[in-house]
Amino acid sequence: MGAHLTALSLSPPELVDAAAATGYRYVGLRMTKVTPQEPHYPLAYDPALMRRTKTHLAATGVEVLDIELARLTSGDSPGDNLRFLEAGVELGALHVIAQLPDSDFARKTDRFSEFCELALLLGLTIDLEFPSWTETPDLREATRVLRAADQPNAGLLIDLLHFARSRSSVGDLRELPPEWFHFAHVCDAPAEIPATTAGLIHTARFERLFPGEGGIDMLGILDALPAGLPFALEIPRATLVAQVGGKEHTRLAIAAARRHLDAHRPAAAPAR
């Protein structure tokens, strides 16, 4: 599967076409603007873009596995995301990536629970991601939220970069309920953890590495997850994309993932 951040310069229809041409079964679509600099594809509010995307999905057979990103901050109401969720259903998505940049545990848990309840009515899971620079920074805190929220459609998104950068425990990961996991974000990165928040964010958004090129214990983390999960390749590399283009970058990403991962875990190949 191809996560949109791998080739965010491609519009949703272009990403679908690139995925079909390079061997992906699924895509994840980024429907909200996370940073001021990145392109915005407002599928929830752009009927023409929605129609084009659905036409390309139907023509290629590629499916949408997830949509992103719902960032539930201290001032947000989960209900504000209803149209975003409805657009995901229209695209055929199954999962929604959420983050909780809120330091108040009770408040963020309540908001996450309410968001899960809203999504459950639409048949969607809410998969909590924990970037190490946010107020929900690691596996332990994300686990606390899921246990406190106690929602049947709540999940954890294990992004290999965020997992490694947060120094989360593979042993703890193995102990969690398998039904919490629906897919994983796969990439590599240097083993050394940046000392600053700016460094952490820069790597995450612009300079990840293909599987096998860095020092993350990719196989150790993935082996702690339930077998057969779809692997979503989230590997933004701004310099390389500028050199070769988004479509070629998606091809290079899946080729590297297959070389490094298929021989070790063929039950969960990157295209599923």
Image (cartoon, rainbow, N blue to C red):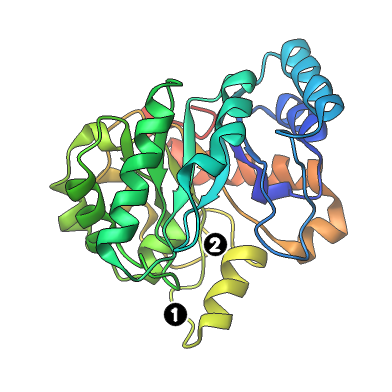
Quadrant housing residue 56? top right
Placement of 110 over or under 161, stated as above or below? above
Residues 208 and 106: in front is 106
* Mark 2, other Cα within 10 Å: few <14 / some 14–19 / many ≥20: some
Q: Dot 1, how many residues are within 10 Å of its Cα: few (below 14), some (14-19), or many (20+)?
A: few
Q: CA distance from mark 1 to mark 2?
A: 13 Å
Taking the spot 66% from the left edge, 50% from the top edge, the residue there is 5
Which numbered disc flags the more N-terminal residue, 1 or 2? 1
- Of the pair 213 and 164, the residue shown nearer to us: 164
Position above or below: 76 against 66: below
Which mark is in front, 1 or 2? 1
Task: Tell me if 151 is positioned left or right of 94 in this view.
Answer: left
Residue at 13% in and 47% down: 175
- Residue at x 63% of width, y 27% of height: 87
Can I make out residue 234 in this image? yes
The picture quadrant where one finds residue 268 is: top left
Classify residue 258 as left or right of residue 109.
right
- Residue at the (74%, 49%) spot, across then down: 8
Determine which of the numbered discs, if any, sits on residue 143 in the image: none
Q: Which residue is mark 2?
A: 213
- Where residue 224 appears, as percent x and y from the top left, is 24, 46
Which image quarter is the N terminus in? top right
Q: Amino acid at mark 1?
A: Glu
Circles 1, 2 touching at the beta carbon (< 8 Å): no
Q: Secondary structure at mark 2?
A: loop
Residue of label 1: 192
Q: SS class of the residue under badge 1? A: loop
Residue 56 sits above or below residue 81 on the image: above
Q: Amino acid at mark 2?
A: Glu
Q: Position of residue 142 (x, y in %)?
A: 29, 56
